Amino acid sequence: MKRYVFCILLLALPPAAAVEPQFEINGLVVDQTLSRIGHLFYEELINGWEVPDDAGTITVYERPDIFAGNIIWVEVNDTIVFQDRVGTRPSGIEEKAQAARALLDSYIKRHKDALEGLEIY
């Protein structure tokens, strides 16, 4: 009986309630990397970086590539801001993370300035 009541309640929900919500949390940096090198890149990226509150959601992704090392990219609110290949060794990860951080800072500042220019902010 409980099972039938649950099924009826589930079917009574509007379709929008079953869809995953789309929202952004400002200043959140999400790690979606897969390998040890990817996690190291993420740690180097956020280490000592004060993420601006109005940055939006920043996500670090990684895709395996067996021929040329993994591909890492960083998105701000679903816009790719940085993309590069990383090898299987940790050498050079710190420099790539610093380059990504510089691009992120620049992108966030330009985006904020553009919104202020439109008087939407």
Image: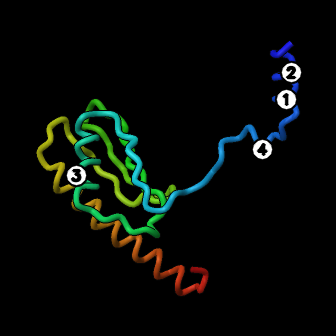
Query: In 3D space, how far apart are the residues under numbered discs 3 and 4 (Cα atoms)?
Result: 39 Å
Q: For this view, does 58 lie left or right of residue 67? A: right
Label pair 3/1, CB-CB below 8 angstroms: no
Q: Please tell me which of labels 3 and 4 falls first in the chain.
A: 4
Few, some or many C-alpha atoms within 10 Å of disc 1 (few <14, some 14-19, many ≥20)? few
Residue appearing at x 53%, y 87% in the figure: 117
Residue appearing at x 27%, y 67% in the figure: 102
Query: In 3D space, how far apart are the residues under numbered discs 4 and 2 (Cα atoms)?
Result: 20 Å
Query: In 3D space, how far apart are the residues under numbered discs 4 and 1 (Cα atoms)?
Result: 14 Å
- Quadrant of the image for the N terminus? top right
Q: What residue does disc 1 label?
A: 9
Label pair 2/1, CB-CB below 8 angstroms: yes
- Judged from the image, the secondary structure of the residue bearing numbered disc 2 is helix
Q: For this view, does 60 lie left or right of residue 37? A: right
Dividing the picture into quadrants, the one containing residue 103 is bottom left
Few, some or many C-alpha atoms within 10 Å of disc 4 (few <14, some 14-19, many ≥20)? few
Q: Residue 45 carries which label?
A: none
Few, some or many C-alpha atoms within 10 Å of disc 2 (few <14, some 14-19, many ≥20)? few
Label pair 4/2, CB-CB below 8 angstroms: no
Please say if 59 is above or below 55. Answer: above
- Judged from the image, the secondary structure of the residue bearing numbered disc 4 is helix
Label pair 3/4, CB-CB below 8 angstroms: no
Query: In 3D space, how far apart are the residues under numbered discs 2 and 1 (Cα atoms)?
Result: 6 Å
Please say if 103 is above or below 60. Answer: below
Q: Position of residue 9 (x, y in %)?
A: 85, 29
Q: What residue does disc 2 label?
A: 5
Give the residue type at disc 1. Leu
Q: What residue does disc 4 label?
A: 16
- Quadrant of the image for the C terminus? bottom right
Q: Which mark is residue 44?
A: 3
